[in-house]
């Protein structure tokens, strides 16, 4: 997988690019948001995972190609109602969002649609949204468990201008693809090839996006 | 969508004014005084300068005592001498006018447990602990009239006559002489301090197992009910309307029938004062507690006092408030009495269960309502305190460094203290429940600290340190070889909802500075050292374990559970013994200052002064003089080391 430690990045070839983006995961509780993040960041999966309390902040760096490194700063939110008033804080400055539903739970797509609507209304104008139908592994063996046909969700995603994947955090199917597709759609050009190091001097108080701030001369992912 | 949802907006930031008021209101007995500057403001706890640890100041005026005209307060030396008399089965010690070097003999309650299991009490001790149950609340302001207490206890008399049955089926086998000279269990070189009790061990071993699904494996409901009944401890939380909110064991389907019974009982006890709302049935102790719109029920075979069970229930209640805040919860019930609180509480079930399981395993911190600190040199702690102060960011309210549930250092505003109950909720979330643990990375957690202010939220930044590579970017919670005991967390708490990146920056600065000035290495060493064994503290001591609580600091110390209590069953039995001692010390109409008891497998001591509470256990054959000497040496140790074992003052801004 991608390099774990962006700090290890040394100034590499002069044409290498390093960009940093904020990503937020939204969706109903228990659809697998944390599991997707854990698969993406640590390449792990727990069959029994306790609900997220509040929100977790994680980072992961991936190499898009030989010269491009993308660092995600990820907010994994809890899907519960009581945290809803906090959600704007997590998506306000996000460059991209993954809205997750569970393909075996019909109601979870409705919830996902509501999140998409909210993002399109309230979030960054250029936010890139991906729709992820998770727990794909559950329908592989018993197709009758599927509650949401792929075509339906796909059509909805297309109409709403979303990236779309059916994923399994358990088998890791399409997980890497999902995040890579997002990274590829992000406006890397704005993240200039050379800039100052951002991390130490960041003004702390707000949740300003760090995307478009760049770091070093690019991390190498060896 | 967010704003449109009725019960969505639960988060009310709390303004500073609100906060101040509530803190003033909440400067109760249990506030962690060490975290406060102005200690004398704390009524309720005798204000003892920390340096006098082990040197009790003169006692407050005594309540009227009927039977012991010759009582004297302990001398200021605080030394302990136990009478030489042989263990008696009567709870009352002989009246002697002859003075000892320290405490009057009349203060000492001694009795023997003969041929008893660790949970079964001899008639004498049963009487004693019943006295405790009966008068759990009469300790203050009562005239100490025993007859009155007995009468007031009448509605729960069944419990009074039946402590044995309260201990339940698992204790059947107590005719076996308890003394096991050489336990085959490894790690225990000498005789076990508790008699063998295979039934209890069996029950305890499965206590935390999930019940089978009624539908799966073709198991019928009866079999599941048997499993359910075998649990040593249940907690249930119901709404006033009888809706289930939480049950430690069993799903709705399973507990529905119990709920009906429990609701009936609750209404039966509705008018009764809290102390009376306990009863024994089928060999199990039931305690019911009402708080706001909730009824909380503890069902236990573990032999706690009602007061102790109520403390546990209160903690569960505080956990619910911590998720919802009091006004939000009350509003929900006001709007709709039949509100299903499980929905707004979704995701916190594991926090409630982890708390409950902590009580079942046995929690010295809850028993004593006190905190434990990581022992280190005063100068070392000062460096850490100063680093916290130096790196403190603008919107920080509290900053804590915690190692496996033991406090390393705290920074706080001068006028705000921290309550052990609130810290317990936080420690439970971080070190017991898996939610934050499993998440990886850093966390931003809105929570209400109900003893600080039960009406609003605070926001807590949490990150775990990798002690081997503390300066590395955190991508995951480090795996520490020593389990949760060795995990070090940095907690930064703010009223600022959007303060995550500010506190994250502070965390980075803090860790960098702590690394530079050598503090991380010191914390690492202290953590790896673990708690000292009894014999490390006092070479050759007869004590096998102890709890020492400094009242003034609202902190306690204890030695390692190894080697005598390394397995969970032995640990649970030790805590149960402490609970009995605690009850004996706290709930008699005549507060004994010293309580001494012996059984065939251990001998134990509880000693209370205005400065400290001490609970200690030694092997059965320990001479009284030796036990007294050991206790005195322990007091000397604490006096000598108090600035290392306790956080005194902390970092205040
Ligand atoms: N079979 C299967 N289970 C999953 C998958 N992703 C998550 N889960 C399970 O679904 C439950 C909820 O997952 P979690 O990541 O906590 O959901 P969140 O609340 O959206 O963060 C957990 O028990 C996971 O093990 C998946 O892809 N396949
Ligand atoms: Mg989650």
Image (tube, coloured by chain):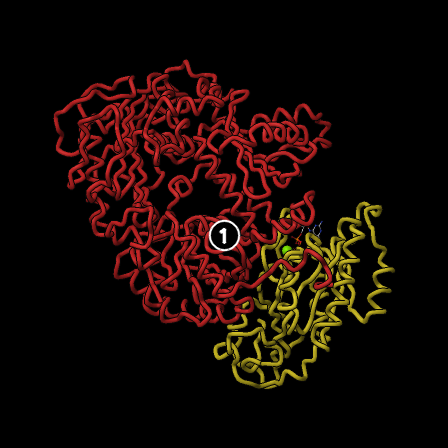
Is residue B641 left or right of B293 when viewed as pictured? left
* Residue closer to the observer: B597 or B381: B597
Q: Mark 1 lies on which chain?
A: B
| Residue B205 seen in this snapshot | no
Q: What element carries label 1?
A: loop
Which of the two residues, A190 or B8, is positioned nearer the viewer here?
B8
Expressed as whole percent of the image width and height from the top left, the position of residue B638 reads: 24, 46
> Percent x, y for residue A26?
69, 62
> Which x, y percent locates residue B530?
35, 48
Left or right of A81: which side holds B423?
Answer: left
Residue B182, by quadrant, is top left
Give the residue drawn at x 41%, y 26%.
B134
The quadrant in which the C terminus of chain B is found is bottom left
Image height of B133 relative to A61, above or below: above
Which residue is the site of mark 1? B450
Dot 1 beta carbon under 8 Å from ligand 2: no
Q: Residues within 10 Å of mark 1 (few under 14, many from 20)?
A: many
Instruction: Evaluate whether residue A176 shows in this view.
Output: yes
Indicate the chain coloured red by its letter.
B
Instruction: Locate residue B412 relative to residue A133 in the image: left or right.
Output: left
Give the quarter of the image for residue A184. Answer: bottom right
Where does residue B242 sit, x and y in percent of width and height? 65, 36
């Amino acid at each position: 997988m991608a390099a774990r430690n962006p700090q290890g990045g040394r100034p590499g070839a002069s044409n290498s690019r390093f960009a940093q983006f904020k990503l937020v995961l939204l969706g109903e509780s228990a659809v697998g948001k944390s599991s997707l993040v854990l698969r993406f960041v640590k390449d792990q999966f727990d069959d029994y995972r306790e609900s997220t309390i509040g929100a977790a902040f994680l980072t992961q760096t991936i190499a898009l190609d030989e010269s491009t490194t993308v660092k995600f700063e990820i907010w994994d939110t809890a899907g519960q109602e009581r945290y809803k008033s906090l959600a704007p804080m997590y998506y306000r400055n996000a460059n991209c969002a993954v809205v997750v539903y569970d393909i075996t739970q019909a109601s979870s797509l409705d919830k996902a649609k509501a999140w998409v609507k909210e993002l399109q209304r309230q979030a960054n104008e250029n936010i890139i949204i991906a729709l992820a139908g998770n727990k794909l592994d559950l329908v592989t063996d018993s197709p009758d468990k599927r509650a949401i046909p792929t075509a339906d969700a796909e059509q909805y995603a297309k109409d709403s201008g979303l990236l779309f994947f059916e994923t399994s955090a358990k088998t890791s199917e399409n997980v890497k693809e999902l995040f890579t597709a997002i990274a590829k759609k992000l406006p890397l050009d704005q993240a200039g090839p050379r800039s100052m190091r951002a991390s130490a001097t960041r003004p702390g108080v707000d949740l300003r996006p760090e995307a478009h701030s760049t770091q070093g001369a690019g991390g190498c992912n060896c | 969508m967010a704003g449109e949802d009725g019960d969505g907006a639960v988060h009310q930031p709390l303004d500073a004014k609100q906060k101040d008021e509530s803190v003033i209101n909440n400067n109760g007995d249990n506030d962690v005084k060490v975290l406060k500057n102005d200690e004398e403001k704390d009524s309720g706890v005798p204000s003892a300068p920390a340096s006098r640890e082990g040197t009790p100041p003169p006692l407050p005026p005594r309540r009227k005592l009927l039977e012991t005209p010759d009582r004297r307060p302990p001398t200021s030396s605080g030394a302990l001498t136990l009478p030489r008399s042989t263990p008696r089965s009567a709870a009352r010690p002989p009246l002697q006018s002859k003075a000892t070097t320290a405490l009057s003999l009349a203060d000492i309650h001694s009795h023997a447990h003969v041929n008893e299991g660790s949970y079964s009490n001899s008639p004498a001790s049963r009487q004693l602990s019943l006295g405790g149950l009966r008068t759990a609340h009469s300790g203050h302001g009562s005239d100490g009239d025993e007859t009155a207490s007995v009468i007031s206890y009448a509605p729960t008399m069944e419990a009074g006559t039946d402590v044995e049955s309260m201990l339940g089926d698992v204790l059947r086998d107590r005719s076996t002489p308890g003394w096991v000279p050489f336990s085959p269990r490894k790690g225990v070189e000498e005789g076990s301090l508790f008699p063998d009790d295979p039934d209890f061990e069996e029950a305890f071993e499965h206590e935390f197992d999930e019940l089978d699904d009624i539908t799966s494996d073709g198991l019928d409901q009866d079999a599941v009910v048997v499993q359910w009944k075998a649990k040593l401890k249940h907690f249930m939380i119901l709404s006033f309307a009888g809706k289930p909110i939480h049950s430690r064991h069993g799903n709705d389907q399973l507990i529905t029938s119990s709920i009906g019974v429990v609701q009936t009982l609750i209404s039966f006890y509705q008018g009764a004062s809290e102390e009376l709302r306990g009863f024994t049935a089928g060999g199990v102790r039931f305690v019911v507690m009402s708080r706001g719109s909730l009824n909380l029920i503890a069902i236990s075979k573990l032999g706690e006092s009602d007061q102790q069970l109520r403390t546990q229930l209160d903690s569960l209640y505080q956990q619910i408030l911590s998720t919802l805040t009091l006004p939000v919860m009350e509003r929900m019930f006001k709007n709709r009495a039949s509100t299903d609180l499980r929905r707004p509480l979704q995701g916190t079930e594991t926090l409630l269960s982890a708390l409950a399981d902590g009580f079942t395993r046995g929690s010295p911190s809850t028993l004593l309502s006190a905190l434990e600190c990581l022992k280190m040199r005063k100068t070392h702690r000062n460096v850490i305190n100063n680093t916290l102060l130096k790196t403190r960011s603008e919107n920080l309210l509290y900053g804590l460094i915690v190692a496996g549930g033991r406090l390393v250092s705290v920074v706080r505003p001068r006028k705000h203290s921290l309550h052990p109950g609130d810290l317990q909720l936080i420690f439970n979330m971080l070190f017991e429940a898996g939610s934050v643990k499993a998440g990886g990375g850093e966390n931003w957690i809105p929570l209400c600290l109900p003893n600080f202010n039960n009406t609003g939220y605070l926001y807590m930044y949490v990150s775990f340190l990798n002690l081997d590579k503390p300066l590395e970017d955190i991508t995951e919670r480090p795996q520490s070889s020593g389990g949760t005991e060795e995990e070090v967390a940095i907690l930064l708490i703010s009223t600022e909802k959007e303060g995550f990146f500010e506190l994250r920056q502070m965390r980075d600065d803090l860790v960098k500075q702590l690394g530079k000035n050598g503090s991380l290495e010191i914390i690492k060493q202290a953590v790896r050292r673990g708690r000292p064994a009894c014999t490390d503290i006092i070479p050759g001591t007869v004590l096998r374990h102890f709890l020492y609580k400094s009242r003034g600091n609202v902190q306690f110390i204890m030695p390692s559970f190894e080697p005598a209590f390394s397995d969970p069953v032995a640990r649970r039995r030790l805590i149960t013994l402490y609970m009995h001692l605690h009850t004996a010390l706290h709930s008699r109409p005549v507060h004994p200052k010293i309580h001494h008891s012996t059984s065939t497998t251990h001998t134990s001591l509880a000693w209370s002064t205005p400065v400290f509470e001490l609970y200690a256990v030694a092997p059965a054959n320990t001479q009284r003089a030796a036990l007294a000497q050991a206790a005195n040496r322990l007091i000397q140790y604490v006096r000598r080391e108090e600035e290392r074992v306790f956080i005194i003052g902390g970092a205040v801004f």
